[in-house]
Image: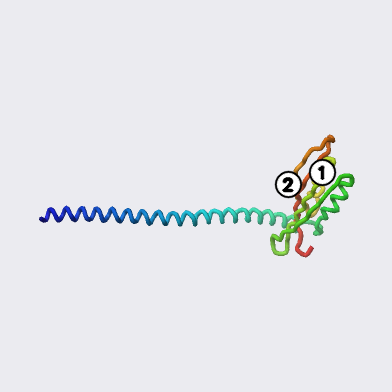
Amino acid sequence: MTGRYAIRIVWGTTIAVFLAGVILGVVAIRRIRVASGRIASLQNSCRELSDLHEEMALSRSCLRTYEDAESREPVDVPARVKKAFQFGRGDVRTTETHVLAGWSVRLSDVSLTNVDLKQVGAFVHELEAMQPPVWLSKITIRASSSPGRGDVALAMRQVIPDNE
């Protein structure tokens, strides 16, 4: 009888260990699903924070350039467009975004129609050479039927104090 009881105890223990393993496996799968959702959420948050960090670094570099400038007057981009492109049609839309305490970034979207493309390069160079500078963020050029002329879209950015 002792041999029979020993075999039953071994089989009973084996079945109990097997069932415990299955239960632990199911619990682990559920926890992994919950954890993977949290991990994905944290990855998205890290990406967003990285993007914000890059934007903040750009804003700080703009701020340093502004603080080192001889003049602190922001550039009047619409007036400069009218002055530089008297014979072309230009449209300027300006928005401001607060980035740091006391400072904002002014974004100017400039649309020029049928302008001399050489003038555009000189215009951008002039704005970037000013103190404080206006930086070119994006440019789109569409050629027209006249040689050397075209439609241009510029995205310009400059740092300005909030009280301006």
Q: Who's the residue at 70% across and 64% down the image? A: 101
Q: Is residue 135 left or right of residue 28?
A: right
**Neighbour tally class for label 2: few under 14, some 14-19, many 20 plus, Cα within 10 Å:** few
Q: Position of residue 103 (x, y in %)?
A: 73, 61
The colour mode here is: rainbow
Q: Position of residue 88 (x, y in %)?
A: 86, 45
In the rendered image, the quadrant that contains the C terminus is bottom right
Residue named by callout 1: 120
Circles 1 and 2, Cβ within 8 Å, touching? The answer is: no
Residue 138's disc is 2
| Occupied quadrant, residue 46 | bottom right
Q: Amino acid at mark 1?
A: Val
| Occupied quadrant, residue 63 | bottom right
Q: Position of residue 79 (x, y in %)?
A: 86, 53
Q: Who's the residue at 84% across and 48% down the image? A: 90
Q: Who's the residue at 12% across and 53% down the image? A: 3
Q: Secondary structure at mark 2?
A: strand
> Total number of numbered labels?
2
**Neighbour tally class for label 1: few under 14, some 14-19, many 20 plus, Cα within 10 Å:** many
Return the residue nearer the eye: 59 or 109.
Answer: 109
Q: Amino acid at mark 2?
A: Lys
Q: Is residue 72 left or right of residue 23?
A: right
Q: Secondary structure at mark 1?
A: helix
Q: Is residue 21 left or right of residue 86?
A: left
Q: Who's the residue at 39% across and 55% down the image? A: 28
Q: CA distance from mark 1 to mark 2?
A: 13 Å
Residue 9's disc is none
